[in-house]
Image (tube, helix red, strand yellow):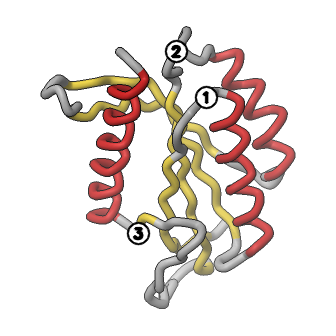
Amino acid sequence: MNQTNFRRLRSLRLATLACAALVTGCAVNAESPQTEKAVACDAGSPMAETTLYFGLSRPHGPDITMAEWQKFVDKEVTPRFRNGLTVFKAHGQWLGNDGKVAKEGSRALMLIHPLHDQDSNKRIEALRSIYKKTFAQESVMRIETTKCVSF
């Protein structure tokens, strides 16, 4: 697949995923936060839940290995979110401009952090930037929701 087709597929995939996210939550661009409704919690406290989706395919070259992924988690994610995180194995697919279904392995990273916390936002955006640069990715999708959380 050439670079142009890869970019088109990735853009279409992200648009599709963003539309799906809007049905279940609130897709957020860090530069233009969405207005959210107040959450009343019967148990726990309102907190932000951020899920990041990291593709494991490179535009050119081999897929990102599990060793490379774990090194990224250990070196970049854990130091920024020492209180905890969850990683899910995922498989994404989307319809390409050529009418064919494209598939890609991925990892979803879920983070729970205080609402409207600029420090958390900066750490999350740093992760997205580092991953894109390190693994030649055009994007890392970010989905924000507000949840009632207790520990």
Report which residue position mark 3 lands on: 26
Sequence-first tag of 3 and 1: 3
Amino acid type at image mark 1: Ala
The answer to whether mark 2 and mark 1 are in CB contact below 8 A is: yes
Question: Quick one: 55 or 99, which is closer to the camera?
Answer: 99
Mark 2 or 1, nearer chain start: 2
User: Which residue is label 1 attached to?
Assistant: 136
Pick whichever of labels 3 and 2 is earlier in the sequence: 3
Residue 16: where, in percent of width, then height? 27, 48
Which residue bears the numbered disc 2?
60
Assess disc 2: are there few (<14), some (14-19) or many (≥20) residues with their C-alpha within 10 Å of its C-alpha: few
Alpha carbon distance from label 3 to label 1: 26 Å
Single out the mark in the foreground, 3 or 1. Answer: 1
Residue at image location 69% in from the left, 35% down from the top: 133
Determine whether the residue tagged by mark 3 lies in a helix, strand or loop: strand
Distance CA(mark 2)–CA(mark 1): 9 Å
Q: From mark 3 to mark 2, how far is it between C-alphas?
A: 32 Å
Residue 145 against residue 76 in the figure, above or below: below
